[in-house]
Amino acid sequence: METTINVTDEKLFLDLVEYTKLPVRLCFERCNYAFRELAALWHKKNPKNQAEILEYYRKNEELYLFDLTTYQLMMKENVKMMLKQMKELGVKKVLEFGGGTGEFTIQACQAGFEAAYFDLDGEIKNYALWRFKKHGVNPKVIDEKTDPLAEEWDLVNAMDVLEHLEKPEEVIKKLKEKTKYIFVNPEEIKYNLFYPQHISKYELNGFENIEEYLWKLI
């Protein structure tokens, strides 16, 4: 999962350096290291239920800032493609479900979409809010206590989220009721020693794959 970063033009990485106030080189190395440490911490605690799983995520949010930044850097070209697909479909109202650093939300806002962001309260969400302000975007930010799938969306981005849930089928059922399109990547999910947080395999019953990460309600 290691990545190569050109620090002169990667605003996502430069945001992380500015926010964490770490030296550039150390920030870079921590980006490449974070997923290994997160895996070790999971194995050490071996969470068994939803409460323990949530405690793991909340306790390790700082490391996740680096892990999620690496992931978004790897997804840079994919996000461009996703935005292009959304324009071609005539999508207007879009939700980033489990939004992390908020990179997709930022780019969706800048591209003119009506974007919303949802994630758990904590450092990751605080970082996303800081980034929204820095980059001059104003997405709808949905409170943790609110069900974002209680309303309808043209498209929901749930990339790298469902496999972290104990019961992803419950979310998939809501997605079928509340949106026509989703972005997900079930074929790329890694289930191994380094990704123990991927606790669930799921099937997208009711959706068909259109292209790459784009799925449409049948």
Image: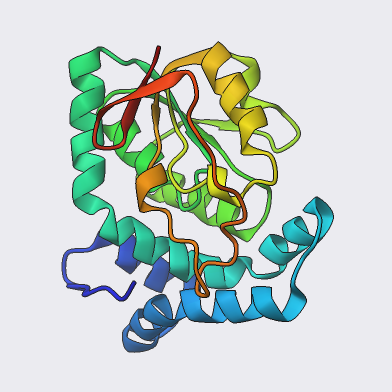
**Front one among 16 and 165:** 165
| Residue drawn at 35 percent across, 26 percent down | 215
Q: Is residue 111 above or below residue 74?
A: above
Q: Quarter-wise, where is residue 190 in the image?
A: bottom left
Image location of residue 129, percent across then percent down: 52, 47
Image location of residue 97, percent across then percent down: 52, 36
**Front one among 164 and 96:** 164
Image location of residue 158, percent across then percent down: 47, 37
| Residue drawn at 32 percent across, 87 percent down | 25
Q: How many marks?
A: 0
| Residue drawn at 48 percent across, 77 percent down | 34
Q: Is residue 72 above or below residue 5?
A: above
Image location of residue 123, percent across then percent down: 62, 60
**Front one among 166 and 61:** 166
**In the figure, is residue 89 to the left or right of 200?**
left
Quadrant in which the N terminus is drawn: bottom left
Quadrant in which the C terminus is drawn: top left
**In the figure, is residue 176 to the left or right of 105?**
right
| Residue drawn at 67 percent across, 62 percent down | 57
Q: Quarter-wise, where is residue 84 in the image?
A: top left
User: Does residue 136 appear in this view?
Assistant: no
**Front one among 122 and 209:** 209
User: Does residue 36 appear in this view?
Assistant: yes
